Amino acid sequence: MDIERNIILERKDKKPILIDAFYSETLSDQPIIIFCHGYKGFKDWGAWNLMAKSLASSGFCVIKFNFSHNGGTVENPIDFPDLEAFGNNNYTKELDDLNDVLDWTQKKFLNHTLVDSSKICLVGHSRGGGIVILKASEDNRVTKLVTLASVSDFGRRTATIGDLEEWKATGVKFVLNGRTKQQMPHYYQFYENFMSNKERLDIASATERIQIPMLIIHGDNDTSVSIKEAEELHQWNPDSQLKIIKNADHVFNTRHPWGEESLSVELKVVVESIIDF
């Protein structure tokens, strides 16, 4: 298997994006899977590398990346040293990042003998699930869509709303990162960006517009994003497939760091479901 780690995608007047690519050097017609991490997430979290390897060994070219304003840097993509970037992140920046990753992926594998760049499946976890739904609804390069523990409404998230008057007055509110113990800032621009792009960021109407195959995966023990959100997505797109994984939490019973050499039972079901789909 060919694994390229921490490829730097430089962009004019924008922060760089770090990308990983996993693909086989022998299997032909590998469709592309692009994975988007969630809120306070990153491409190397927990068992995501193991998940990418599992998918790649089953005949997929897997791309995963860090959103440019997730708080990581090129030098340290894991521990959120750039809290200023994190505070300046918003949903439309993540959509722009995903667009640039799509452009890069198509260019990289355009004439590749083993990778089929005309088949692109977006996979998004949690907030990344909302991002991939929006992107798939507006970009016809995307041919399949998978959400993992996805949110169904950005307007309901605490990152988007809550303490609006105080937030506006101070210009910033803080969220504790349980893993790093950092107080992570959200600048008020996050709310302003959401309000001024409300129609584009409406996950419900985007889900209703989806014309491509869509698989919704959610654990029935998810305490971070309710299983009701998965049911809403399925309701808005009755042609979608809904896969409920028993006893699975928000990260499919993995954690960071993930020292095991194999996937959790629940994440293995996720991988198998994606492969079947």
Image (spheres, rainbow, N blue to C red):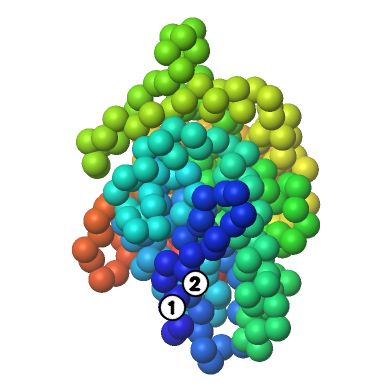
Residue 12: x and y, percent?
62, 54
The answer to which image quadrant residue 53 occupies is: bottom left
Q: Is residue 14 among the parts visible in the rendering?
A: yes
Q: Is residue 156 among the parts visible in the rendering?
A: no
Q: Is residue 83 above or below residue 100?
A: above
Nearer-N-terminus badge (1/2):
1
Residue for point 75% across, 53% down: 139
Residue for point 76% across, 47% down: 138
Q: Nearer the viewer, residue 274 or 21?
A: 21
Could you classify mark 2 by the number of other residues whose Cα lies within 10 Å: few (under 14), some (14-19), or many (20 or more)?
Answer: many
Residue 63: x and y, percent?
52, 66
Q: Nearer the viewer, residue 48 or 266?
A: 48
* Residue on which the image places disc 2: 21
Helix, strand or loop under label 1: strand
**Residue 43 left/right relative to 276:** left
The answer to which image quadrant residue 198 occupies is: top right
* Residue on which the image places disc 1: 3
Q: Nearer the viewer, residue 256 or 109?
A: 109
Query: Which circle marks residue 213 in the picture?
Result: none
Q: Quadrant of the C terminus?
A: bottom right
Q: Amino acid at mark 2?
A: Ala
Q: CA distance from mark 1 to mark 2?
A: 6 Å
**Residue 222 left/right relative to 259:** right
Helix, strand or loop under label 2: strand
Residue 232: x and y, percent?
61, 34
